[in-house]
Amino acid sequence: MTRRAFDGVEAGQELPTLARVVTREDLFAYGEAGGDRNPLHRDDDAARAAGFPVVIAHGMFTMGHMAACVVAWAGEAAAVERIGAQFRAAVLVGEEIVAGGRVRSVDAEARTATLETWVTVQRDGGTELPVRKGEALVRLG
Amino acid sequence: MHPQAEGTIYPDVAFFVDPQRVAAFREVFGLTEGVPPTFVTAAEFQVIPTVVADPRVGIDFTRVVHGSQEYAYARPLREGETLTIRARLASIRSKGGSDFLTIETTLRDAEGAVVCTARSVMIERTDP
């Protein structure tokens, strides 16, 4: 992959959205790779005991998906110099999460872009933001 | 929670940037190159459970949820390198009936240079 060129990037531009349906296999694989093996993310009984109908995604799984959306836009993982987000709603297994973002500002001297990013899920006829106030600093080529 | 625990620094732990683990992490997110920006969560998981379970901090870890997360990189992580992780209890605050614990984790390379700083806010729900 090639890092996105700074020229042509302007405030207000939208990132292509990135969607995926969260599966049990995804959550298990993520738990192994990331080290979070909390039963809330792999055992329905544990999830029910915590008040959820089925297992829920790790907040960091959902944020990792948001980061993948940023990397796809930036062209290279190493271009992402800062990334952060707040966690709000839980994501249930089987739900579709959609990551998106837009360019908030650019710095021509540093050749960087600051992005605002988020993850949405459609639930009960409305849009929820399991990950909100996401922000990323990307160094462009 | 015990606000006097603020500022506590936990013992250093080594973190190997295992290429196989990085590849597994990439695969989960459909990435094809590099170290994913949130991979440092694997390093945090080596130290944060110790902080959260620390009796000096005095929180009920069964009521803790992840509130927010931030990573700042001085340079990208290199697969195959071993970094030193240090966790510090940056702040303990009560707000709106909940307690907020900010854990700052720094990853340093063999020369002692900071490679990444991670800030993780854990919230202890105090509702019944």
Image (spheres, helix red, strand yellow):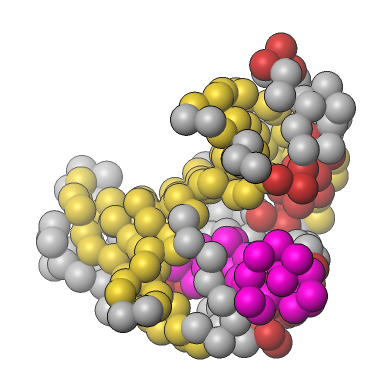
Residue A52 is one of the magenta-drawn residues: yes
Position of residue B38 relative to residue B85, above or below, is: below
Residue at x-position 75% and y-position 66%? A49
Asked if residue B100 can be seen in this view, the reply is: no
Residue A36, x across and y down, in percent: 75, 62
Q: In the picture provided, is A44 more to the left or to the right than A134?
A: right
Q: Which residues are magenta?
A: A42-66
Q: Quadrant of the C terminus of chain B?
A: top right
Q: In the picture provided, is B21 more to the left or to the right than B14?
A: left
Q: In the picture provided, is B2 more to the left or to the right than A19?
A: right
Residue sticking out furthest to the front:
B128
Q: Quadrant of residue B3?
A: top right
The front one of B82 and A93 is A93
Position of residue A52 relative to residue B83, above or below, is: below
Asked if residue B95 can be seen in this view, the reply is: yes
The front one of B93 and A7 is B93
Residue at x-position 38% and y-position 64%? A129
Residue A116, x across and y down, in percent: 29, 56
Q: In the picture provided, is A134 more to the left or to the right than B109?
A: left
The front one of A8 and A49 is A49
